[in-house]
Image (cartoon, grey):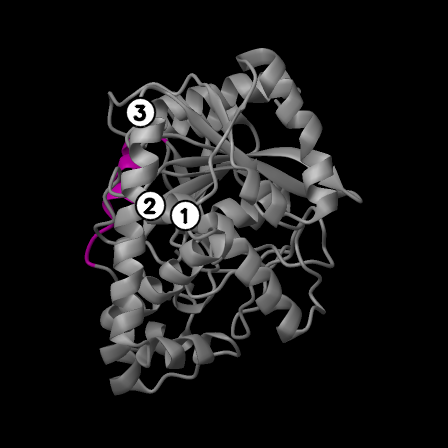
Amino acid sequence: MAQFTDDVGAFMSRNPLGGGSGPLGGLSWAVKDLFDVKGEVTGYGNPDWARTHRPAAGSAQVVLALLDSGGRLVGKTKTVELAFGMTGENVWYGTPRNPRAPDRFPGGSSCGSVAAVAAGLVDFALGSDTGGSVRIPASYCGLFGIRPSHGAISLAGACALAPSFDTPGWFARDAALLEQVGAVLLPGGGGPAAGPLIKVTEAWDNAEPAVAAALAPALKGLEEAFGPALTLAPVPDGLGSLRDAYRALQSEEAWATLGDWVTATQPALGPGVKERFAAARDVAPEQASRGRTVRRQVQAWLRPLLMGGAVLVYPTSPCPAPLLTASAAEQERVRLATQCVTSIAGLAGLPEVTLPAARVDGLPVGLSLVGEAGSDRALLSLAKRAAGVLGLG
């Protein structure tokens, strides 16, 4: 694919691939530049990565599945370098514009994919989610997005960051198409996702008051349709303990995965990314060990709770998208608060769908539905019903 950058600063292509008959026939899509496309260099958001890697010998399995379905791949999208960031900033290739809030970050390392869909350049786009990089940009840009159950979809042919958290994911402007893509990519079977709803009080308390207030009518609407929400008992040791466990484990895995390349290549890394890799190199073994203990506890606590169809509901992000001019300190504050909620599904390996359920001062904010592991298809079906109830399309 010859490449170009469009007016949202997100989208690169000239020669489409695929298309034709199939369940996704007639639909256009784009793919985050950490998935291999045969014959193309997978740039992974960093010039030194692109320089030190050859064109892909084959396409990622998930890319092949979408091509086989009749979808027309029209380009690759930008990513935060090495997928190690939450705002969507890329100092080397430019930060994609948030089409719903041009003065604010698009969010997540799947920033280009979310921007391409939100701008209407493609029908859907493939991204990846380790610590929120589909869920958070979907919330910031007013889209539907899904992080599947961990391991539900192969990541063969995709660049890794933290393999025990990495998942593919995708964006769409309506819940029906989100489900339609899932029918191609997700395995059949799995448990139900029909309720009851469970309100994660601490996640609502973690959100900025304006966000919680804006999303309250959506929760009320879902309760009227699906029954009153139950209230989840307090998270053991609080959401901060989940965040800290996630950060320790992600750091340990990021260095184990990419540390040899960073050490050997000495790549130029942008602000924030450079510091995160330095911290990953120095993560204490006891921190990671504690993180693994917390992850086991979270899984033992949440997975039985959700068996039979119960669904967690809480704000996807504690705040709308930060301003592009936000200071490093403000970005870190948002990152810490955000990881308090993204770590819930991340540590437990659960599927999470976010719906563009409200706005705060005109800025999109998402509402998340989280089901038991393996309930992905049922959760997408529930999300489509919820979208209908809330008039979201």
Q: Position of residue 59 (x, y in %)?
A: 25, 50
In the picture of the structure, the residue carrying the numbered disc 3 is: 307
Residue 53 shows in this picture: no
In the picture of the structure, the residue carrying the numbered disc 1 is: 236
Of 36 and 134, nearer the camera is: 134
Packing grade of label 3 (10 A; few <14, some 14-19, many >=20) is some
Q: Position of residue 121 (x, y in %)?
A: 57, 42
Distance, label 3 to label 1, CA atoms, is: 19 Å
Q: Are marks 2 and 3 in contact (CB under 8 Å)?
A: no
Which mark sits nearer the N-terminus, 2 or 3? 2
Amino acid on which disc 1 is placed: Pro
Tell me what residue is drawn at x 24 percent, y 42 percent.
151
Of 68 and 155, nearer the camera is: 155
Q: Are marks 3 and 1 in contact (CB under 8 Å)?
A: no
Q: Is residue 96 above or below residue 268?
A: above
Q: Which region shows up in magenta? A: 57-70
Q: Are marks 1 and 2 in contact (CB under 8 Å)?
A: yes
Amino acid on which disc 2 is placed: Val
Distance, label 2 to label 3, CA atoms, is: 14 Å
Q: Quadrant of residue 269?
A: bottom left
The residue lying furthest to the right in this view is 361
Amino acid on which disc 3 is placed: Met
- Secondary structure under badge 2? helix
Q: Nearer the viewer, mark 3 or mark 1?
A: 1
Residue 240 shows in this picture: yes
In the picture of the structure, the residue carrying the numbered disc 2 is: 298
Which mark sits nearer the N-terminus, 3 or 1? 1
- Secondary structure under badge 3? loop
Left or right of 237? Residue 138 is right
Packing grade of label 1 (10 A; few <14, some 14-19, many >=20) is few
Distance, label 1 to label 2, CA atoms, is: 8 Å
